[in-house]
Amino acid sequence: MKNTIKKILVVAFMLGTLIGYANVKSTSFDDAKKVRVVFHSVQKGQTISLKNNNGRTIYNQEILISGKFSRVFNLTALKKGNYTAELHKDFEIIVKPFTVKEGEVSFSISKEYTIMKPVIRTEKNRLLISKINSSKEPIDITIYYKDELIYSETFKEGPVFHKVFRLLKDKTGDYKVIINSDNKSFVKEFNI
């Protein structure tokens, strides 16, 4: 009986809070200066981030509910320059570039693009790396064994990259692979 009453009170409290927020108007920004960032088909656990031209993250949020992500930002306080809104999914990063100039924010839909993340996996003593490289940018691969560099090479492959590395069976322990491509770094640590 006590549990039922507690559940009813919690539901009533949550409903009251929800109704209270539903009545709040988003008038904290000047209508001409607010920007709505929208991503469709997001999944719980993915992240949205805003980055400056140097790749420094100025905002980061984990998606808590699957579906459509829509958020109003006041980006006019940012310094003049180029920025990106990025949705980090399991195997891709959707990038929406925007520019801040004299307090005005402008998104260029035609400049939106997708970066495919590399797929890195291990099978026994083999390291398998695959990446769709539509930009045809060079791919830098660096492999460390117990924090010691054991391999580094730059590949200038076509649109699809596949590479298999055979690791020595007697070199068991901690490995780290770093892949640099499309002005991004992808890191995976693993143990053999």
Image (cartoon, rainbow, N blue to C red):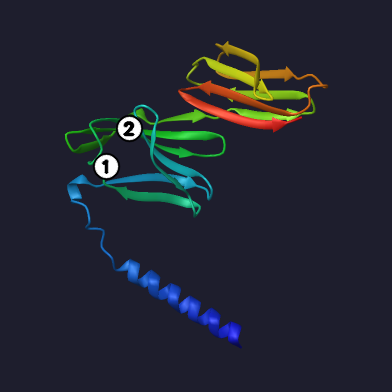
Q: Is 82 left, or right, of 175 in this rendering?
A: left
Indicate the quadrant where residue 151 lies: top right
Q: Is 174 left, or right, of 119 in this rendering?
A: right
Question: Can you say whether 151 is above or below 67 in the image?
Answer: above
| Amino acid carrying mark 2 in the image | Tyr
Residue 150 x/y as whole percent: 67, 16
Question: Can you say whether 64 is above or below 149 in the image?
Answer: below
Question: Can you say whether 156 is above or below 66 in the image?
Answer: above
Q: Quadrant of the C terminus?
A: top right
| Amino acid carrying mark 1 in the image | Leu
Residue 54 x/y as whole percent: 36, 27
Under circle 1, the secondary element is: loop
Front one among 186 and 162: 186
Which residue is under mark 1? 75
Residue 79 seen anywhere in this rendered image of the structure: yes
Q: Quadrant of the N terminus?
A: bottom right
